[in-house]
Image: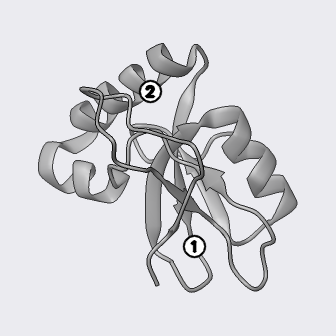
Amino acid sequence: MAPERCPGTRSPFGGSSLQLPCIGVSDARAFGVCVFNGADCDHIWRMFGADGVAMYLDTCTAEYGAPCACMQLTAGPDAPLSYFVNAATCVRYRAEYPGSVECLDAARAPLP
């Protein structure tokens, strides 16, 4: 199942009109989190390693003005998926839905 789209969002890169995904919505989770740029963290890890993910996290942090993390769905119809999101939002979402999401740094370590 493809992620829903976040209403009124646009990619921060090059004025793209791509509407960004909202991840985490399911029958068991009533709301989701809008992602930073649509890039899948796992894909970036496979292609570029931790340095590539760190670069994406730095860009996300600069754009949001707050730290970012990879939000990885560990349960549900969209799992496994991982996208760049605001870190504080990810941590709050994880607290709301424990066991179904993890918030990871560039080294794939869970955020506290």
Calculate the distance from the C-alpha at mark 2 to the C-alpha at mark 1.
22 Å
Q: Amino acid at mark 2?
A: Cys
Tell me if mark 2 has few (under 14), some (14-19) or many (20+) residues whose alpha carbon lies within 10 angstroms of its own: many
* Residue 89 occupies quadrant: top right
Say how many tags the image has: 2
Picture coordinates of residue 26, whole percent (x, y)? 69, 79
Say what secondary structure mark 1 lies in: loop
Say what secondary structure mark 2 lies in: helix
Tell me if mark 1 has few (under 14), some (14-19) or many (20+) residues whose alpha carbon lies within 10 angstroms of its own: some
Residue 24 vs residue 14: left or right? right
Please tell me the numbered disc located at residue 60. Answer: 2
Residue depicted at x 46% and y 14%: 62
Q: Amino acid at mark 1?
A: Thr
Which residue corresponds to mark 1? 74
Looking at the image, tell me whether mark 2 or mark 1 is earlier in sequence order. 2
Picture coordinates of residue 75, whole percent (x, y)? 61, 79
Residue depicted at x 38% and y 37%: 11
